[in-house]
Amino acid sequence: MLCSFINEMAASRFVNVSDEDISQFLEENENKNTARKTSQDVALFKTFLRERKLNDPEELTPLQLGTSFLYFNLVA
């Protein structure tokens, strides 16, 4: 009986949320300035890769991406 009571308390302590609820929360609380800055930085990194005749980031292996990003941070 005590175990059942404890399980009910634990179950009611936390709210169930769906993936849709989480997505909506993130969209509503997204910092617009941060999103804009991130988009600008990604565009700059892609320009850097194009000028160096490298592939888009999505086409690079993790090692190539890491190396390219490290070099980008050193020269940008």
Image (spheres, helix red, strand yellow):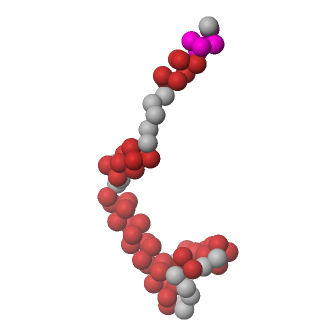
Residue 18 rendering spot, x and y as whole percentages: 44, 42
Which residue lies at the image location 32% right of the left edge and 49% below the top edge?
Answer: 28
Residue in front for this viewpoint, 18 or 67 = 18
Q: Residue at x 64, y 76 (%)?
A: 61
Q: How many labels were placed on the picture?
A: 0
Quadrant of residue 70 in the image?
bottom right
- Above or below: residue 8 compared with residue 35: above
Horizontal side of residue 20 vs 14, given as left or right: left
Q: Inspect this view and state whether residue 46 appears.
A: yes
Asked whether 65 or 7 is in front, the reply is 7
Secondary structure predominantly adopted by residues drawn in magenta: helix
Residue 4 highlighted magenta (yes or no): yes
Q: Quadrant of residue 17?
A: top left
Residue 67: give x, y in percent of width and height. 64, 77
Image-quadrant location for residue 43: bottom left
Looking at the picture, tell me which residue is in the foreground, 5 or 44.
5
Please, which residue is most extreme toward the right here?
Answer: 63
Start and end of the magenta stretch?
2-6
Q: Residue at x 52, y 17 (%)?
A: 9
**In the image, is residue 64 above or below residue 38?**
below
Residue 74 seen from this side: no
Residue closest to the eye, 56 or 36: 56
Question: Residue 6 placed where, x, y %?
Answer: 58, 15
Which quadrant is the N terminus positioned in? top right
Picture coordinates of residue 58, whole percent (x, y): 54, 76
Is 5 on the left-hand or right-hand side of 44? right
- Is 36 rendered above or below residue 48? above
Q: Is residue 23 magenta?
A: no
Question: For the point 47% across and 80% down, which residue is it?
Answer: 46
Residue 52 left/right relative to 67: left
